[in-house]
């Protein structure tokens, strides 16, 4: 597996720095960054068209989860649930992998834009990637910490992702078919509630992550926005993407409107 995340940003001359808006795209269980990029290719055109008038270049970053499910089929995950204990095995590896993506984004921002405070602006996740995105958004909020009993397992990756992202919170998170992490030891990521702005997209015909489950995640987020689409467990495009795009533009760039 190529560990480098897939991006779809065009190459521009180094003597013409342009401000970029970076979105971390997290795939679902048994997918890969490359597959998720193919499935969401239509989103890039919509993003590019909307951000161009603002003088921004959108960059979608598609890392692949570090947990191998079936290498021969290019199936990966951000963590695996232990069916006997309920624990999320490899969550630390998933978070540490994302931390490296953060560091690379910050390096590129410094070198290409001369911006010491930039990097990944927001996260968009699907299914397991949405659960990961919600946990990530929570983890990057200042003041949140695991209880003493959970520190040995979670403090290391928590410090790593915060340092990697320059101790900055994410501007927003978009969650498709998301859910609350099951292990009780991760309750600290949802209590107190997540304050990072979130937009939850729920499929009315989704039988993998049903509406009730996604709404439980939305209930853990302050002022969460939700949208139902008349489909199943996938990322809808076309007119069903426009409310998501409006949310990203409004929260990520207050002067922008469609």
Image (spheres, rainbow, N blue to C red):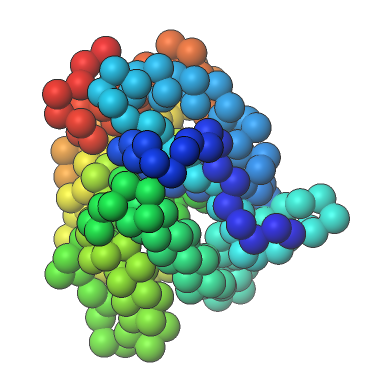
Look at the picture and state if 99 lies above or below 174.
below
Q: Is residue 187 above or below residue 216?
A: below
Q: Quadrant of residue 250?
A: top left
Above or below — where is 216 with respect to 106?
Answer: above
Out of 28 and 232, give the one closest to the viewer: 28
Which residue occupies 43% across, 30% down? 202
Q: Position of residue 96 (x, y in %)?
A: 47, 70
Q: Residue at x 30, y 72 (%)?
A: 163
x 48%, y 36%: residue: 12
Q: Looking at the figure, which quarter contains the N terminus?
A: bottom right
Q: Residue furthest front?
A: 15
Based on the displayed image, in which of its 4 quarters is residue 213 positioned?
top left
- Residue 103 coordinates in the image, percent (x, y): 41, 64
Above or below residue 86? Residue 9 is above
Q: Which quadrant is home to the C terminus?
A: top left
Q: Is residue 189 visible?
A: no
């Amino acid at each position: 597996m190529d560990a480098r995340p897939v991006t779809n940003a065009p190459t521009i001359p180094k003597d013409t720095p342009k401000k970029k808006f970076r979105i971390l795209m997290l795939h679902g269980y048994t997918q890969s960054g490359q597959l998720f990029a193919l499935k969401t290719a239509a989103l890039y055109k919509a993003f590019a068209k909307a951000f161009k008038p603002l003088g921004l270049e959108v960059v979608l970053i598609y890392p692949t989860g570090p947990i191998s499910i079936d290498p021969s089929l290019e199936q990966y995950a951000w963590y695996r649930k232990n069916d006997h204990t309920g624990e999320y095995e490899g969550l630390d590896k998933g978070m540490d992998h994302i931390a490296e993506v953060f560091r690379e984004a910050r390096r590129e921002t410094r070198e290409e834009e001369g911006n010491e405070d930039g990097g990944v602006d927001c996260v968009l996740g699907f299914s397991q990637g949405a659960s990961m995105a919600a946990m990530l958004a929570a983890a990057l909020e200042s003041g949140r910490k695991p209880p003493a009993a959970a520190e040995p397992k979670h403090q290391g990756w928590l410090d790593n992702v915060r340092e990697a992202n320059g101790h900055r919170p994410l501007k927003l998170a978009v969650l498709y078919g998301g859910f609350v992490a099951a292990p009780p030891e991760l309750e600290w990521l949802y209590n107190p509630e997540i304050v990072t702005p979130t937009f939850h997209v729920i499929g009315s015909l989704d039988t993998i992550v049903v509406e009730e489950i996604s709404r439980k995640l939305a209930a853990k987020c302050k002022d969460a926005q939700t949208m139902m689409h008349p489909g199943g467990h996938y990322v809808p495009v076309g007119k069903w993407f426009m409310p998501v795009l409006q949310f990203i533009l409004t929260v990520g760039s207050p002067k922008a409107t469609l």
